[in-house]
């Protein structure tokens, strides 16, 4: 998503055409799979990367003059120049709140043992307080006072320290304090209802600006001191210092916000974007995040002279292709071929469709590596079955809880996402799946489903057809009827005793084969059937048995697919090609699984790091069957 952002700005819902405020916006993102710090002009130009290497960066806080940035890395506080150079460790363990002096020379922070300050230009930290639970410091504009929070039992108090003397200003505080630019007020969330309040540094003049602001509203003063911005569950708000004019500027859940140096706009970060909102409510999207790319915190600072910004690293490709091979940075566990294309699943919410010879595969869902990385505290889902049919892709997902929940999803090649839900079902562990056996080809998609009630055993498997995005039941057999393959508007289904039925798309029976089938594939007039110890080729139109070829009678033997008089099967983990007319049998080296279409053979393989997944294509004329 990012390469286009370097060249052009993605415009959001705002309609303002006024020139962007000056300075630079600093934020964190894990677009390269690890969290780094970035800086960009409010116009959308000049995107730069501040940090490189292992990553783990978050919550950048630039100084007002733009010369320095304080940020966290794996819980430790670091200080660096505004372009990311000369980074140095300040404290190994800290509280998250920090504060810059108005002249940008001193940074205040909390660490074990109290409140500390450090000069941006260099030198060791200086300890200001010795309370182990002191935290959330805020420096006064003149640099002579510092406010901070202190735990007292179960309560938190607001303390102001000046010239070595400490004064308790307010009790029952629940948010980070913020000094007004003129030094006359401190804004903080406090009280039983967590109101946004103002109070003098002396402890006098206490008044409520906004009721029930919330625990994390953390107000920020505009540079001219006339307004305060705060965030709550509804979005980003602004209110005048008098308490009048409170209004909602932007909806959503900001993960950090910062005033522009001139106080005419506010930058805020969400889980999906960095955005800028004017005081009139016009919102511009500065840049968008893919899934899991966003990191907390955003800052807006003046543009400092003399800094040398570095070009951002390229976003690692999730897949790369050559004329006949696709490689992926994750193993490919599921794929499905139809015609001259193959669809594949990479990880939750990410699919792709590739036609050999094309320079770029089609992405369905995000195409970034970070989206494939396991996310803590995020429930995952897994694809159990996948079927490509023309322009449509259907697949089954499963999530395990008290019961196993399966969902049938459908997307199209015109969409750029994972699609819509078609059906869902849940079943108890040990019971047959509520949804199963998705197969397709050409324009037809079918699947199997069972009624699954908590108080009753699951019913028989019946076959459903997907019309557009609507499921239509086409069989009502009292026994299981399992769809195995689809070709040219026909369905091969297996009964509970192994007998096969050839059905049309309305469920009408075209032919019945009284066999004990372990599997079947349908390709034109070839109905290839796997029975114990044999592969058989029947005529789909007459039912005549044409060819029989022996197979080892072992559980590892499995029929996978057929096309143009050739069957593909696997035996003991090795993929084989079998020509039906004469029994020529050849192995496919390195193949893990394979599917045949009229275009040729698609097979998956295990690649080498950092490309452990792969799919290869062999045109039909080049299949090794000589």
Image (cartoon, rainbow, N blue to C red):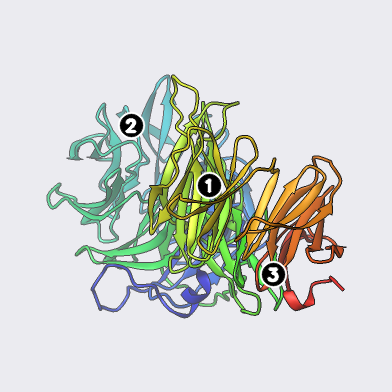
Q: Find residue 75 and report its image quarter.
A: top right
Label 2 or label 3, whichever comes before in sequence order:
2
Mark 1 and mark 2 residues within 8 Å of each other at the beta carbon: no
Q: Residues within 10 Å of mark 1 (few under 14, many from 20)?
A: many
546 above or below 377?
below
Residue appearing at x 73%, y 74% in the figure:
620
Indicate left or right for 90 with 245 as reference.
Answer: right
Q: Residue tagged by mark 3?
A: 564
Mark 1–mark 2 distance (CA, rounded to whole Å):
50 Å
Q: Residue tagged by mark 2?
A: 173
**Mark in front: 1 vs 3:** 3
Indicate left or right for 619 with 582 as reference.
Answer: left
The answer to whether residue 115 is visible is yes
136 above or below 431?
below
Q: Secondary structure at mark 3?
A: loop
413 above or below 293?
below
């Amino acid at each position: 998503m990012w390469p286009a952002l370097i060249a052009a700005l993605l415009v959001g819902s705002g309609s303002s055409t006024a020139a962007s405020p000056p300075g630079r916006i600093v934020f964190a993102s894990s677009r390269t799979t690890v969290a780094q710090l970035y800086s960009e002009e409010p116009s959308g130009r000049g995107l730069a990367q501040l940090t490189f290497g292992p990553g783990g960066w978050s919550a950048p806080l630039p100084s007002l003059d733009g010369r320095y940035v304080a940020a966290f890395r794996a819980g430790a506080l670091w200080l660096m120049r505004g372009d990311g150079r000369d980074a140095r460790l300040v404290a190994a363990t800290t509280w998250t709140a920090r504060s810059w002096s108005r002249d940008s020379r001193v940074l205040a922070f909390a660490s074990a043992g109290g409140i500390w300050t450090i000069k941006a230009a260099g030198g060791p930290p200086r300890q200001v307080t010795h309370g182990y639970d002191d935290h959330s410091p805020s420096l006064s504009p003149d640099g002579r006072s510092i406010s901070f929070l202190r735990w007292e039992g179960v309560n938190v108090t607001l303390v102001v320290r000046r010239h070595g003397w400490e004064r308790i200003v307010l009790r029952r505080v629940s948010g980070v304090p913020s000094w007004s630019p003129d030094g006359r007020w401190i804004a903080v969330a406090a009280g039983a209802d967590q109101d946004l309040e103002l109070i003098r540094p002396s402890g006098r003049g206490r008044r409520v600006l906004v009721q029930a602001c919330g625990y994390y509203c953390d107000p920020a003063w505009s540079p001219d001191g006339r307004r305060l911005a705060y965030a709550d569950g509804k979005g980003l708000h602004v209110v005048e210092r008098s308490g009048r004019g409170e209004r909602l500027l932007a909806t959503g859940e900001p993960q950090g916000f910062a005033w522009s140096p001139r106080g005419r706009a506010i930058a805020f970060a969400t889980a999906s974007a960095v955005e800028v909102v004017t005081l009139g409510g016009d919102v511009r999207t500065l840049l968008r995040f893919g899934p899991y790319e966003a990191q907390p915190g955003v800052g807006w600072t003046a543009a400092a002279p003399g800094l040398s910004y570095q070009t951002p690293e390229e976003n690692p490709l999730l897949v790369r292709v050559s004329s006949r091979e696709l490689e992926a940075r994750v193993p490919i566990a599921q794929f499905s071929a139809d015609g001259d294309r193959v669809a594949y699943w990479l990880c939750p919410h990410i699919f792709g469709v590739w036609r050999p010879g094309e320079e770029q595969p089609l992405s369905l869902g995000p195409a970034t590596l970070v989206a494939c990385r396991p996310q803590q505290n995020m429930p995952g889902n897994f694809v159990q079955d996948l079927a490509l049919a023309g322009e449509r892709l259907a697949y089954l997902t499963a999530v395990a809880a008290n019961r196993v929940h399966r969902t049938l999803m459908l997307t199209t090649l015109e969409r750029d996402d994972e699609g819509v839900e078609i059906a869902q079902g849940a079943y108890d562990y040990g019971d047959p799946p509520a949804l199963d056996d998705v197969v397709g080809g050409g324009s037809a998609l079918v699947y199997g489903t069972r009624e699954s009630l908590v108080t009753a055993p699951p019913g028989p498997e019946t076959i459903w057809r997907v019309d557009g995005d609507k499921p239509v039941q086409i069989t009502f057999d009292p026994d299981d009827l399992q769809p195995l393959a689809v070709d040219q508007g026909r369905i091969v289904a297996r009964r509970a005793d192994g007998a096969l039925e050839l059905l049309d798309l309305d469920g009408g029976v075209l032919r019945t084969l009284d066999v004990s089938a372990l599997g079947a594939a349908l390709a034109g007039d070839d109905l290839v059937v796997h029975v114990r110890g044999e592969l058989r080729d029947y005529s789909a139109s007459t039912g005549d048995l044409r060819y029989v070829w022996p197979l080892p009678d072992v559980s590892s033997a499995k029929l996978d697919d057929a096309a143009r008089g050739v069957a593909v099967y696997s035996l003991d983990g090795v993929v084989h090609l079998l020509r039906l007319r004469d029994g020529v049998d050849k192995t496919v080296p390195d193949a893990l699984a394979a599917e045949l279409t009229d275009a040729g053979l698609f097979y998956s393989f295990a690649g080498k790091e950092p490309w452990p997944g792969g799919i290869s294509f062999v045109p039909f004329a080049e299949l090794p069957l000589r």
